[in-house]
Image (tube, grey):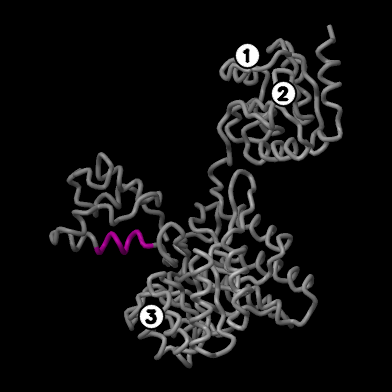
Amino acid sequence: MVRLSPLTVHGLLPGINCKKCGEVTCLAFASKLVARTAEVEACTPLFEEEQYAEKRQKLIELITPPVVSVKIGGGERTVVVGGEEVLYRHDLTFYHPCALAIDISDEMDEETVKKRAEWADRLKIERIGKVLTLNLIAVRDVSDDPEKFAKVVSWVRESAGLPLILCSYNPEAIKAALDVCEMDRPLVYAATENNWQEIAPLVKKYNVPVCVSAPDNLTLLKQLAVTLQAYGIKDIVLDPGTFIDNGGLNRTLQNFALLRRAGIEQEEEGVGFPLLGIPAIAWANGEDSVTNAYTEAIVASMLIAKYADILILHSEDVWSLLPVFTLRQNIYSDPRIHPAIDPGIREIGNPTPESPVFVTANFALTYHTIESDLEDGKIDSWILVVDTEGIGIESAVAGRQFSAVKIKEAIDEFDLESKVSHRVMMLSGLASRISGETEEETGWKVIVGPKDSGGLKAMNLKELWEKKAQEE
């Protein structure tokens, strides 16, 4: 797919600069469409005036990525998956992070269902200033009892606000569940070779997205997707199957990669849809819970790296979920932008004028690591965050984004000297080479700290500061 230019998109807009989209000109709106920071529906004349019908159709076709986006749920917690147009994040970026779902069986009792749903809804892990969460709950029809399945779906809705995946091959169970949560716009899993004729009318009637499943049979998967498209269903997700035994993981990864390549590079009909994997299959091995959770984390991580858009998990162990969350965060960050925080002065705990001062870069990972170590060590302190353009300390020292002059400018700009009674700062050991020039430039005494802020807790910082302050 050739990257769009604002001028190409502008040629298909009304060109009347009416400002109804919130932008001053149509060209400015076109730039936002290309950058994916605006929706085409914001151009109301394009949709309301018949004279623009042809342009509207051409524009929608032009800006629709080769892998279409699918919305699951509604309101603030709507999950959008797909919508990608590159295979590698360094070519552009990935726009919609892989959605992670936790499963709930309809064989669980009410208390267990609600407890697990509440846990999934509340789970939050903070990393580098971002809050990482689960995105969906997958309710599995194990009982093959439509009434029981619908009841469990209602229990989940009462206990959590996450969008749902309705997992059943039984059309009657799917209908019973949709009657309970129709307005929630759940993802129906799954339409198969054997049930699509019953599932398709339900999906169309309730206007919900559907997942097509044909394990390890890409030809059948494509045929089913094309058939549902012809039926008038547009919001489709593909499940090529998840296998982990006897070379199964290799086949799984190959299938995911083949589908994504065919969708983006060849723009092949019937395959340009989000992909769903089920790492929870690891729990069917009959191994102990630790081995299952470990295997699930490995499978989930590999599928995230190979284009999965939705993953269904089972483990509640944070040690198993954390690497999956972390990998997802790393892959689905914009490689063109350094993860940075605003420069300034941060307070850790309850610092006083006598509390130590640490100076660091505004690279998000650097700052949040230091912040976490200081909080963990219960070290009341000040952190002076220098604007290094989001670059880490070692690289910023080499590139002079972190220098004596920059530190002096930050001290003056944020009036650090009015907050503390001493003139002593600590620099990371990674910046030891500029300690001398920093003392000359700022008039402050410099303590060279450890390269890893994890070592701060073991240091007698009060003694260090007092000794340094007394030096001539």
Label 3: how many Cα within 10 Å (few below 14, some 14–19, many 20+): many
Residue drawn 75% across the image and 23% down it? 356
Residue 329 at x, y = what percent? 60, 53
Above-or-below relation of 445 to 365: above
Front residue of 257/124: it is: 124
- Is residue 389 toward the left or the right of residue 171 in the image? right
Mark 1 surroundings within 10 Å by alpha-carbon count, few (fewer than 14), some (14 through 19), many (20 or more) = few
Residue 227 image offset from top left, x and y in percent: 38, 85
Residue 63 lies in the magenta stretch: yes
Disc count in the image?
3
**What whole-number distance in Å separates the C-alpha atoms at marks 1 and 3?**
65 Å
In the displayed orientation, state which residue is furthest to the front.
111
The quadrant in which residue 435 appears is top right
In the image, is residue 167 part of the stretch drawn in magenta?
Answer: no
Q: Name the mark on residue 418.
A: 1
Marker disc for residue 316? none
Secondary structure found at label 1: helix
Q: Earlier in the sequence, mark 1 or mark 3?
A: 3
Q: Nearer the viewer, mark 2 or mark 1?
A: 1
The percent coordinates of residue 422 (x first, y second) are 73, 13
For label 3, the SS is helix
Q: Residue at x 43, y 81 (%)?
A: 225
Residues shaded magenta: 57-64
**Outermost residue toward the top?**
472
The percent position of residue 312, horizontal first and vertical second, equals 59, 72
Mark 2 is on which residue type? Val
* Residue at image mark 2: 357
In the rendered image, the residue lying farthest to the bottom is 194
